[in-house]
Image (cartoon, rainbow, N blue to C red):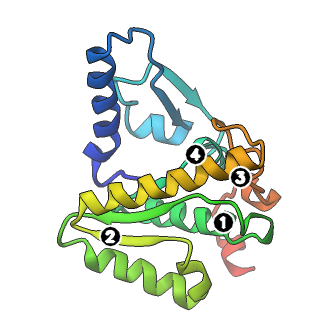
Amino acid sequence: MYRLWSGAMKGPMKGATIAHAKQRINDARYVGISEPGIIAAESPNPIVNELIIMPDIEKRLEAFVRLGHGIIVFPGGAGTAEEILYMLGVLLHEKNHNIPLPLIFTGPAGSEAYFETIDRFVRQTLGDKAAERYQIIVDDPVEVASQMKAGLQHVTQFRKATSESYHFNWQLHIPEAFQQPFEPTHEKWRS
């Protein structure tokens, strides 16, 4: 979800690598999730030691939400917007309305216009209820960390209370239409 801000994808993994080295953890797992179209365009993060290649973008997006405990989105392009809409489509499904999954849109000063545009589009197409599923916090990494930490505590409590796996979100309902590959064509545009 962070193609425009390439350091945002590498930063957390690099930080984890340094922390693991200081703790003398030599067998840490650094998982990357990709798909053939992305691999053709850019090589995986060199820190990744377990690369999972999903058959298509839809399976990759499902893997992100199933493995994730919280999602942070940085400004990007069309792919980022697609990922945001995918996330909201999943979170807004009636079977998922009680499942906590913190979603924060953030970036440096100057990215306000990007998120204002996304927020306006979401509200006009999906309604204000959709906007309740995310927070926009610009130019305040400490607040992002604080809000994500609080959200993750809620996720942990929910998963314990419902006997859910902490490492995989089995309870999250992914509609079948969200699992099928979509090939954009002129014919599909007209329908």
Task: Look at discs 1 and 4 and give the one toward the viewer.
Answer: 1
**Mark 2 — residue?**
137
Query: Which amino acid, by three-letter code, is at mark 1?
Result: Leu
Total labels: the figure holds: 4
Q: Position of residue 86 (x, y in %)?
A: 61, 63
- Which circle's residue, 3 or 2, is located before the other in the chain? 2
The Cα–Cα distance between marks 1 and 4, rounded to whole angstroms, is 13 Å
Report the side of 3 relative to 96 (left or right).
left
Residue found 33% across the figure and 64% down from its top = 106
Look at the picture and state if 113 lies above or below 94.
below
Q: Quadrant of residue 21?
A: top left
Residue 20 visible in the current orientation: yes
Mark 3 or mark 2, whichever is nearer to me: 2
According to the picture, the residue beneath numbered tag 1 turns out to be 91
Residue 89: percent from the left, percent from the top?
66, 68
Q: Position of residue 62 (x, y in %)?
A: 66, 48
Q: CA distance from mark 3 to mark 4?
A: 16 Å
Which quadrant, please, contains the C terminus? bottom right
Given residues 40 and 133, the one toward you in this image is: 133
Say which label, 3 or 1, has the lower sequence index.
Answer: 1
Q: Which residue is mark 3?
A: 181
Circle 3 or circle 1, nearest the eye:
1
Label 2 neighbourhood size at 10 Å, few (<14), some (14-19), many (20+)?
some
Pick whichever of labels 3 and 4 is earlier in the sequence.
Answer: 4
Residue 61 badge:
none
Q: Amino acid at mark 4?
A: Phe
Disc number lying in front (4 or 2): 2
Under circle 3, the secondary element is loop
